[in-house]
Amino acid sequence: AQSVTQPDIHITVSEGASLELRCNYSYGATPYLFWYVQSPGQGLQLLLKYFSGDTLVQGIKGFEAEFKRSQSSFNLRKPSVHWSDAAEYFCAQTNFGNEKLTFGTGTRLTIIP
Amino acid sequence: DTEVTQTPKHLVMGMTNKKSLKCEQHMGHRAMYWYKQKAKKPPELMFVYSYEKLSINESVPSRFSPECPNSSLLNLHLHALQPEDSALYLCASSHPPGGGPAYNEQFFGPGTRLTVL
């Protein structure tokens, strides 16, 4: 069965500092990987996705993620965070033809001035 | 139109009430999903409809009854709920998976915040 691990429950970063959120997915020949962001009480917004090809993918709001098959990882990065980036971040995985999207447990990001 | 809309935004109901949640999309998607999300947890899949037919029911109690009257609309009928059913209910849509990677991308609505008293 698919599983997604986000090792960090809560991360605090100073505004303007760089950010990396970790995500490890379970083994799959062709994983489809996603990062979603959720502000309190809101729905999920897709930041970026990886299906195949270039392992460094660019998303919205200045985020990027790198797919590393050898490490089964899909870490999210941002060079300089803004106070508005404070939210919950979910990594998710599915596979070809699969209707189920498996979510990680989420990482809560706090930004300090 | 790349939006999934959900109504109402908030709902408070008693344990004996009957209410419905509504979800609508006009992206031509033929797969629609209901998720339940408790505070500080990831969304949990409840139901999947594919081509207006129920394809996945994740052992959800019968007090939750989904309905997909057409390809754009998804309802969740609620009856005799318990306080532990209080949560954010999210709807999502996508193309039916299997047509290629882009078919797996799910678009989420803003959710309905449900409180059961």
Image: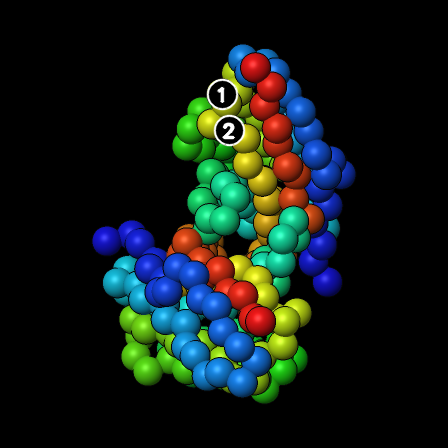
Identify the image's colour scheme: rainbow, by chain, secondary structure or one colour: rainbow
Q: Is residue B26 above or below residue A88?
A: below
Residue drawn 59% across and 23% down? A111
Q: Position of residue B67 (x, y in %)?
A: 41, 82
Left/right placement of residue A73 relative to residue B47 reads right
For the image, the number of numbered tags is 2
Secondary structure state at the residue bearing disc 1? loop
Q: Amino acid at mark 1?
A: His
The residue where tag 1 is placed is A82
Q: Nearer the viewer, residue B2 or B23?
A: B23
Left/right placement of residue B95 relative to residue A12 reads left
Residue drawn 44% across and 66% down? B11
Identity of the residue furthest to the left in this view: B1
Q: Is residue B29 visible?
A: no
Would you identify the image quadrant in which residue A21 lies? top right
Distance (Cα) linking label 2 and label 1? 5 Å
Q: Amino acid at mark 2?
A: Asp
Left/right placement of residue A2 relative to residue A33 reads right
Crowding near pointer 1: few (<14 within 10 Å), some, many (20+)? some
Residues at marks 2 and 1, common chain? Answer: yes
Q: Is residue A36 above or below residue A1?
A: above
Q: Position of residue B80 (x, y in %)?
A: 56, 84
The residue where tag 2 is placed is A85
Label 2 chain ID: A
Q: In the rendered image, which quarter contains the C terminus of chain B?
A: bottom right
The reply to whether discs 2 and 1 touch (Cβ–Cβ < 8 Å) is yes
Q: Nearer the viewer, residue B76 or B29?
A: B76
Label 1 chain ID: A
Residue drawn 34% across and 58% down? B4
Q: Is residue B84 above or below residue A45?
A: below
Q: Nearer the viewer, residue B53 or B100?
A: B53
